[in-house]
Amino acid sequence: MATDVQTKKDAYKRGEDQGRADALAGKPYADPPRDGKRGEQDHYANGYDWGYEQGRAQSEQDQPPKEQDQPPNGQDQARKLDLVVWQEGGVEDAPGGLGTTINVCVRTPNWSETVDAGEREHVFTAPTGFRWNGTVGAQYKRINQTTGGNLPPVQAEVSADGRTLTFTYHVHLNTSDQDKDCIVYTCGLEAVDGARPGRHTDGVARVGTAPPAKLKAEVIEDED
């Protein structure tokens, strides 16, 4: 068992290193291949995703601000939010299964910048083969892995086909000791009946005018 765990960690680390290197080199994101057998399937891909987001954030932070990107007074709502949005970890479910959750994370590029963007629309599109169940929880997750709660409930709506989850929420980070580092939205997700097994990366998470993020999930076969 220890060897199996170490193999998964190694696969994740290889993916993380490669993803960061690709982002820093300016290469466009490409869905990475799976690494290893079923025991560590997708661990390389999940590491690649996280490494790519880290590298992309670092690249954006290293870029000097462009004068034309600074909006005139009164146009804050139209300006691109200086936030990084990404999916945390891998997600899988089988049709007719118990369902799962997907974590959508939001932070500033340097983790510590203060942002109070006010009420912003969130639009999450589920990957192919999946639908939202309408449940959404919000909390703050700090770099030291501790969490903060006591946030207002999320009032979300789901489209008729289940693919689109929409809600409005107050986005603020690092304005006090309570909202540090990262917002995490935990959203209920389930594979639809008849979905064919496979990994899908066509989901999208949009938080206001921040750059959108890919959402990824795998439809697996019901082992029963």
Image (cartoon, rainbow, N blue to C red):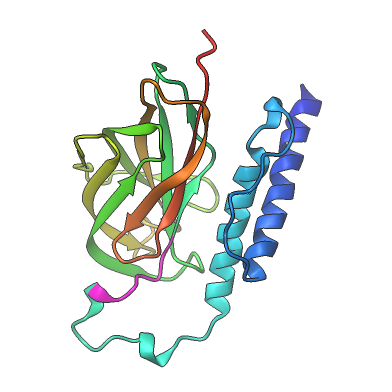
Depth check, front residue: 59 or 144 = 59
User: In the picture, which quadrant includes the N terminus?
Assistant: top right
Q: Quadrant of residue 158?
A: top left
Relative placement, left or right, of 72 versus 82 is left
Numbered marks: total: 0
Residue 162 point in image, percent of width and height:
26, 34
- Identified at 67% across, 63% down, the residue is 22
- Identified at 23% across, 43% down, the residue is 154
- Identified at 63% across, 37% down, the residue is 42
Residue 54 point in image, percent of width and height:
58, 61
**Is 199 drawn above or below residue 142 in the view shown?**
above
- Identified at 54% across, 81% down, the residue is 63
**Is 85 drawn above or below residue 209 in the view shown?**
above
> Extreme top residue here?
224
Relative placement, left or right, of 25 versus 10 is left
Identify the magenta region.
78-84
> Extreme bottom residue here?
67
Q: Does the magenta-highlighted stretch encompass residue 95?
A: no
Relative placement, left or right, of 22 versus 87 is right
> Extreme right residue here?
3
Residue 218 point in image, percent of width and height:
51, 32
**Is 51 drawn above or below residue 7 in the view shown?**
below
Residue 126 point in image, percent of width and height:
36, 41
Magenta part mainly helix, strand or loop? loop
Relative placement, left or right, of 16 versus 207 is right
Depth check, front residue: 53 or 201 = 201
Depth check, front residue: 98 or 170 = 98
**Is 187 drawn above or below residue 112 in the view shown?**
above
